[in-house]
Amino acid sequence: MTRLERRARERQHASRARRVVLIAPSLFLGSSFLVLLVSVHQVAPGDRKIWSLAALAFGVAYVVLISMNYGSRATASKRPTWGA
């Protein structure tokens, strides 16, 4: 392996690590939002609980989608390495 190839691999590895560090806090965004919605549902008056429950249902769907999105962005590489 040449010196240039070694540097390219080191840069690629550093880029992956940097991407995970930048995306990792976003994974906690969904769970904190869900905690907020559950708290709102708990303090809502009886006649308004149906609306907070609807918000909670949409919040769960949101958390599932962004978790899949951020999880795939954190773990996927930019280039496929099938032939390498």
Image (cartoon, rainbow, N blue to C red):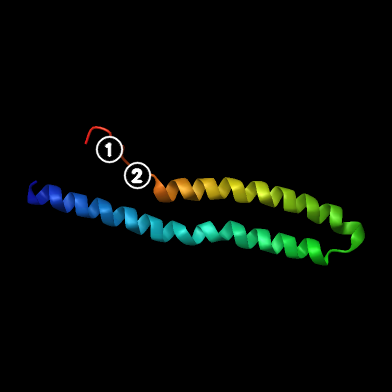
Q: Quadrant of the C terminus?
A: top left
Percent coordinates x, y for residue 45 in the rendering: 88, 64
* Left/right of residue 79 with respect to residue 37 in the rendered view: left
Q: Report the residue marked by disc 2.
A: 77
Identify the residue at horizontal 85%, vertical 57% (top origin).
49
Q: Residue at x 8, y 51 (%)?
A: 3
The residue positioned 80% from the left and 56% from the top of the image is 52
SS at badge 1: loop
Q: Is residue 47 left or right of residue 78?
A: right
Residue 37: x %, y % from top left: 72, 60
Alpha-carbon span between mark 2 and mark 1: 9 Å
Amino acid type assigned to the residue bearing label 1 in the image: Thr
> Quick check: 20 left or right of 32?
left
Q: Are marks 2 and 1 in contact (CB under 8 Å)?
A: yes
Q: Residues within 10 Å of mark 2 (few under 14, many from 20)?
A: few
Q: Residue 26 location in percent, x, y? A: 51, 58
Q: Which mark is residue 81?
A: 1
- The answer to whether 76 is drawn above or below residue 20 in the figure is above
**Label 2 element class:** loop
